[in-house]
Image: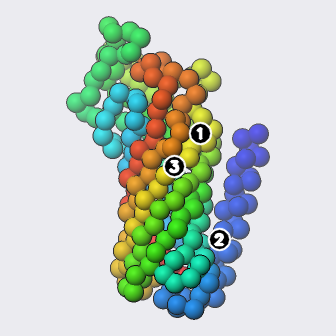
Amino acid sequence: MAKVIKKRWMLIFLSFILCTTNVKAQYGNTDRVFWGGLVGGGNFTQVDGDNFAGYHKAGWNAGVIVYASIGHPAALSMELLYAQKGSRAGQNQVPKMANDQSTIITDYKIKLNYAEVPILLNYFDQKKSNFGAGFSYGQLFSSKEIYTDGQGNKYTQDAKLFPFKKFDVNFILNANAHIWKGFLFNLRFQYSVLSVRNAPNYLTGRSQQFNNIWCTRIMYIF
């Protein structure tokens, strides 16, 4: 089943690439209806509800984007992304396990990998910069939760016993600053609308957990 899902997302990804490379208009042509490009950068994330704080987990955020004008200065956008989310304990965060107060956690990581499709409504200014808001749907295709105790023993949590949900729905706020020609600098904030956890976590004892993400990327629009 996992292989089928990966192949399906790969076909969608290739379709997006074909769409973005066959648009006829260059960025800056106000008569265009459809235009697209490539995006790449990093996510800086935490998981609210895991008893750790801080955007210490870094991961990739990359893929393709397509815009559709709905009348100047507004346009809808749709992206297909590979997005890494999760959390990591800070150097000064060494809590005890929720169910075993005698055991200290010295290192903790959540690694979540998604295929993500954001859909946003965007408004453009005269300098081609833009801002927008919307939602995204993410399909989880791998997850891992790792911790190290005070004796240096490393453990990986059983994903079947303490699973993450197979999807993540996020609210998004987005801003793009035009740099030069088709290049833009992107800053994005997104937050899970629904909990990403199915069951209480062995380490924290909490089931309500939410992806909390700041993202910075470079965009090239054809």
Three-letter code for the amino acid on which mark 1 is drawn: Ser
Image quadrant in which you'd find residue 160 = top right
Q: In which quarter of the image is residue 117?
A: bottom right
Quadrant assignment for the N terminus: top right
Q: Give neighbour class at mark 3: few <14, some 14-19, many 20+ (Cα, 10 Å).
A: many
What element does badge 3 sit on? Answer: strand
Q: Tell me residue 157's x, y (percent).
A: 52, 23
Disc nearer the start of the sequence (3/2): 2
Label 1: element kind: strand
Q: Name the residue at the front extreme.
A: 71
Pick the residue in front: 183 or 47.
47
Point 45% across, 23% down: residue: 206
Identify residue for label 2.
17
Closer to us: mark 3 or mark 2?
3
171 relative to 122, above or below: above
- Residue 192, how many percent across, how many down? 49, 44
User: Nearer the viewer's eye, disc 3 or disc 1?
Assistant: 3
Residue drawn at x 47%, y 62% as measured from the top left: 133
Calculate the distance from the C-alpha at mark 1 to the C-alpha at mark 2: 24 Å
The single residue placed furthest to the left in the displayed view is 92
Q: Can residue 213 be seen in this view?
A: yes
Q: Where is residue 193 in the image (x, y as percent from the top left)?
A: 51, 43
- Disc 3 residue type? Asn
Residue identifier under label 1: 142
Q: Is residue 155 visible?
A: no
Neighbour tally class for label 2: few under 14, some 14-19, many 20 plus, Cα within 10 Å: some
Q: Dot 1, how many residues are within 10 Å of its Cα: few (below 14), some (14-19), or many (20+)? A: some
Mark closer to the chain start, 3 or 1: 1
Residue receiving disc 3: 170
Q: What residue type is labelled 2?
A: Ile
The residue depicted at 50 percent of the width and 25 percent of the height is 207
